[in-house]
Image (cartoon, rainbow, N blue to C red):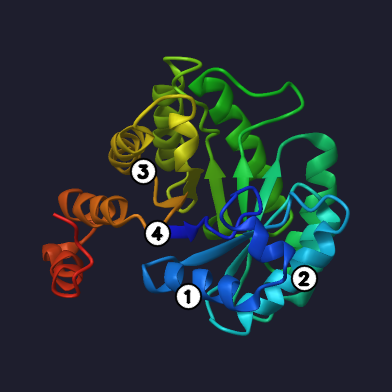
Amino acid sequence: MIIVGEKLNSTLKAVRPAMESRNEQEIIDLAKRQYEAGASYIDLNAGMFHDNEAEMMEWLVNTVQGAIDAPLTIDSPDPEVIRRGLKANKNPKPMINSITAETERFAKMAPLLTEFDASVIALCMDDSGMPETADERFKIAETLIENLTKLGVKLGDIYIDPLIRPVSTGSHYGIAALDTMANVKKKFPEVHIMCGLSNVSFGVPARKLINQAFLVSAMYAGMDGAILDPLDKTLMSLIYAGEAVLGIDKYCMNWLKKHREGAIEA
């Protein structure tokens, strides 16, 4: 499973003060802890700093890459912020979070992919808004994949996000996302599936349980990437268990390794 560590996000009340005060050590510590806990990428989001988001993104990139060599996910809807982050990046192949099939956003974001040889999270949303059904999402995914590959983006560098909407606002949203994952994986096996896991539980109590149930279901549907909190030991343990049960972890070798390391929470 490709894990994008979500903790360095300016929308989180516990993290924003460290960004505001440019507390390098606190930012570095949180990046390191996520990486050591199993994050494949470290997501960087400075969206709450409306007046100087690009400058803050550049500072975050420089701060984090000076401490760890993990690839970074540059997270913003603003192409200029993305460009500033990618330009500062010296770590391995970065990821853009995210592009959509919306005409204007795609046109502005797409050139950055080839200019900086970045992989990309492609969100199933277009000019008609947020899709309701799995069929609508799959058609948008097909459009995104077609247009991205025309630009020269490799299938393995595309991470389709089926648009996770809260099950509290629509009982069908969970299964719609799962069916989209399965359909994309069936037609485009080289394409990755990535989502912001916690979106599914917004607005309900005991959110972690909903997230855990959705995680295991999504892994079965073909999801091989998730934006989540790698410091949540229970969630990470479920990922390792899911990989063992689904035959991804051959002979449970990684499960045994993680258990010996004390990374499994029983």
Q: Which of marks 2 and 3 precedes in the sequence?
A: 2
Identify the element where label 1 is drawn.
helix
User: Disc 1 versus disc 2: distance between alpha carbons?
Assistant: 18 Å
Name the residue beneath numbered marker 1: 32
Question: Do tag 4 and tag 1 residues touch (Cβ < 8 Å)?
Answer: no
Q: Which of marks 2 and 1 precedes in the sequence?
A: 1
Q: Which of marks 1 and 4 precedes in the sequence?
A: 1
**Foreground tag (4 vs 3):** 4
Name the residue beneath numbered marker 2: 58
Residue at 14% across / 74% down in the picture?
A: 260
> Where does the C terminus fall, quadrant-wise?
bottom left
Q: Is residue 43 visible?
A: yes
Name the residue beneath numbered marker 4: 230
Residue 222, label in figure: 3
Instruction: Say which amino acid is labelled 3.
Output: Gly
User: Disc 4 versus disc 3: distance between alpha carbons?
Assistant: 20 Å
